[in-house]
Image: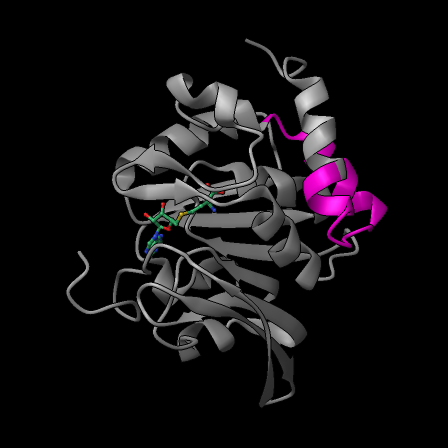
Amino acid sequence: MSVNDFADERRRMVEEQIIRRGLLEPRLLAAFEAAPRHLFVPKDDRHLAYADGPLPIGFGQTISQPYIAALMTDLLQLKGEECVLEVGTGSGYQAAILSHMAMEIHTIEFVPELAAQAQQMLSKHSNVFCHVGDGSMGWPDAAPYDGIIVTAAAPEAPRTLLDQLKDGGRMVLPVGRREYQVLEVWTRRGDEFDCRVEAGVAFVPLRGKYGWKGVR
Ligand code: SAH
């Protein structure tokens, strides 16, 4: 199984799920063309890797639908020089995408087994740094960030994460109820934060200190 397998499926995914839905930024499309999604899903599900939906990755977690990963990446408006934090490494796929789009990526995962697998998958991405722990508190060691992407749903945007943004930095995260959320895009302007709401989404819950109570 290599990176080049599924090249046709991958091209079709980019064309039908991403371009056709209006995301056209060449660097974004190149990142999705490059990342071998089939290697980030469980072996038995490889034939489904390029389908238009999320997939289970074990431990009750999922790898996001390609289009949602693309939309969230697009909303960060990365130019290539940024330092980015991802909360919720999961399979490592989103981090692999980000590694093509920004200078330095920190990604943090709550479930040690997933973090270990993802770290192995991302070992060739020398600009990605994997951490294990509660990302609802961010990763202060590498802060402040130009961009923060949270790939698990929060009851509200954690203030600790907003505080780890640079001036002008953006944070994209799903916020709402347990079953259904909206994507919020926060921008920091000095000590002010403005928030706009994008598409409706459904993510697994954020755990930890600023996540959902009762989800361990
Ligand atoms: N970005 C992932 C999809 C992640 S699914 C990918 O590309 O595959 C959400 C992930 O967030 C799960 O792996 C879950 O364990 C993790 N998570 C939930 N709460 C967390 C927290 N407080 N800190 C870090 N990771 C968390």
Residue 35 included in the magenta stretch of the image:
yes
Q: Which residue is drawn at 37% across and 68% down?
A: 154
Q: Residue furthest bottom?
A: 192
Q: Where's residue 116, x and y in %?
A: 35, 31
Q: Is residue 1 left or right of residue 130?
A: right
Q: In this view, does 120 lie above or below 99?
A: above
Q: Residue at x 30, y 49 (%)?
A: 110
Q: Residues in magenta?
A: 16-36
Task: Give 41 or 134, whichever is nearer the viewer.
Answer: 41
Quarter in which the C terminus is drawn: bottom left
Rendered residue at 62%/81% (across/down): 188
Residue 81 appears in which quarter of the rendering? bottom right
129 or 186, which lies in front?
Answer: 186
Say whether residue 65 is left or right of residue 104: left
Which of the two residues, 101 or 174, is positioned nearer the viewer here?
Answer: 174
Direction from residue 169 to residue 131 in the image, left or right = left
Could you tell me which quadrant the N terminus lies in?
top right
Q: Main secondary structure of the magenta part?
A: helix
Q: Position of residue 97 (x, y in %)?
A: 63, 41
Q: Position of residue 24 (x, y in %)?
A: 82, 50
Indicate yes or no whether the magenta region holds residue 152: no
Residue 172 horizontal/vertical position (percent) = 56, 66
